[in-house]
Amino acid sequence: MFSTIFNIAANAMSANRLRINTIASNIANAETTRTPEGGPYKRRDVVFSATDIKPEGFENVLDQATLKSVKVSAVTADNSEPTLVYDPGHPDADKVTGMVAMPNINPVTEMVNLMTASNAYKAAAEVVTTTKEMSSALRGIAERG
């Protein structure tokens, strides 16, 4: 049973770590107007999906509830139109209009997403810590009894 809990928590931590890294990349590239693909940087987002977990052995018989874990399905690029900013002195400005295509990144939204992902990561880490403590306590009781 404890290994199932550890696997679920580890999957959550891994998925949220990727989300944190992706958000950090978005924030770092909020001013990037030129990419190898051409045009401004496109905001990335991590897509999660739930996966069934079937515990093995005795607990599978006792626990008929379907357990779910998380996995990363994809990292997608936001294909919405870039924000146009008037800056005729910018090297990537349109020569006629003076407009620069800027990434479609809102720093406030990214910071909220970062806090959410960080809190989810911390919650999964706390599950690991609590499970370890429970396992140790049960082991101690079993050794005494």
Image (tube, rainbow, N blue to C red):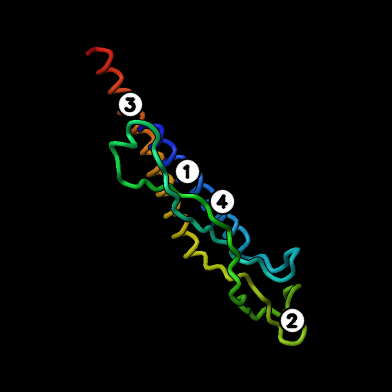
Q: Is residue 134 left or right of residue 91?
A: left
Give the distance between the C-alpha atoms of the residues marked 3 and 4, in whole angstroms: 32 Å
Q: Amino acid at mark 1?
A: Asn
Give the distance between the C-alpha atoms of the residues marked 3 and 2, in whole angstroms: 63 Å
Q: Residue furthest front?
A: 61
Instruction: Identify the disc placed on residue 135.
Output: 3
Give the label, 4 or 2, closer to the camera: 4
Secondary structure at badge 2 equals loop
Instruction: Give whichever of discs 3 and 2 has the lower sequence position.
Output: 2
Instruction: Give whichever of discs 1 and 3 has the lower sequence position.
Output: 1
Q: Residue at x 61, y 58 (%)?
A: 28
Instruction: Give whichever of discs 2 and 1 has the lower sequence position.
Output: 1
Q: Amino acid at mark 2?
A: Asp
Instruction: Give whichever of discs 3 and 4 has the lower sequence position.
Output: 4
Give the label, 2 or 1, closer to the camera: 1
Mark 4 = which residue?
21
Mark 2 = which residue?
94
Mark 1 = which residue?
11
Q: In this view of the protein, which residue sits in the foreground, 9 or 117?
A: 9
Q: Amino acid at mark 4?
A: Asn
Secondary structure at badge 4 equals helix
Residue 94 sits above or below residue 58 on the image? below
Residue 15 sits above or below residue 131 on the image? below
Question: Toward which corner of the image does residue 44 lie, by quadrant?
Answer: bottom right
Q: Residue at x 42, y 55 (%)?
A: 116
Q: Residue furthest top?
A: 144
Give the distance between the C-alpha atoms of the residues marked 1 and 3, in whole angstroms: 20 Å
Residue 48: image x %, image y %? 48, 56
Give the distance between the C-alpha atoms of the residues marked 2 and 1, in whole angstroms: 45 Å
Q: Amino acid at mark 3?
A: Ser
